[in-house]
Image: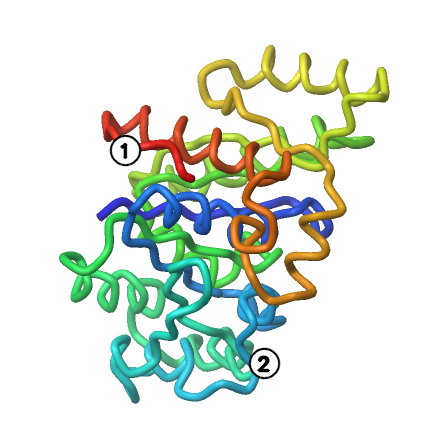
Amino acid sequence: MRVFALVNQKGGCGKTTAAINWAGALAARGRRVLLVDLDPQAHATMGLGVAADHAPSLIDVLREEATADEALVCCKGGVWLLPANAALGEFEEQSERAIGPEGALARQLDAMRSAFDEVVLDCPPRVDGVLAANALRAAQTAVLVVETGAFALQGAVQALRVLDEMRADRGEEFDLAVLGTLFDRRTNFARELLVALHARFADEMFETVIRTSVRLREAAACGVPVQVLDPSCRAAEDFDALAGEWLARAGVETPVSA
């Protein structure tokens, strides 16, 4: 089971959209995929058509008041979900009185190791909080999601510095990767920034970039991955390419999604 956490340095960079549709693309290739919503705003939960007040939810699993099996939801497109709700924010406050709170998610995922091929962790915007720490403790790879917009390069460098410090201070062993999103190839600025990102991050940067697409917004409104809404659209093509690149890095051969 390969676990990767999507993190970012600010909101509005397309992180949750990437989490949902990357998971959908992997499922379309026949992978057994779990998406874990670690954001108390529950956008990934709602983006997969699940009510934000769904119970049991991830916080019950982290508190060990419910098993992961009891909280799992099977969503359209073949993606399994551990849903979030607003109560998840309480975990940050309660963790101050707990022992080893950053290991709660890793313990729960370890019990499901034989059930899934990939686990996608959608992190909250706060990279230095306990929920993000849970994700980074559980993940083999931290994927920094970077919008190809103004100040993105500076923000990405700062965020990677924070991740490097966390990895060094806590002895974490996750790898780092960078994904460009919200790319508009019609603008010179976006094209130049993408070149700069590749130059700065080299092999850490995915070759695939996620282009802006109205289909992604429509899919979220419908509560489905874009592969369900319109499998032939360019957004579905982008995420299929990303899924293929991710699996190729791991040496996994799968058919291209239909």
Residue at the disc numbered 2 = 86
Residue at horizontal 55 percent and vertical 33 percent from the top: 237
Mark whose residue sits in front, 1 or 2? 1
For the residue marked with disc 2, what is the amino acid? Answer: Ala
Relative height, residue 202 to residue 230 (above, below): above
Of pointers 1 and 2, the one earlier in the residue sequence: 2
Relative height, residue 179 to residue 132 (above, below): above
Residue at horizontal 19 percent and vertical 64 percent from the top: 112
Residue 38: mark in rendering: none
For the residue marked with disc 1, what is the amino acid? Answer: Thr
Relative to the observer, which residue lies in front, 50 or 152?
A: 50
Residue 154 placed where, x, y %?
71, 28
Relative to the observer, which residue lies in front, 175 or 36?
A: 36
Relative to the observer, which residue lies in front, 165 or 220?
A: 220
Residue at the disc numbered 1 = 254
Helix, strand or loop under label 2: helix
Question: Quick check: 172 left or right of 189?
Answer: left
Residue 116 placed where, x, y %?
24, 55
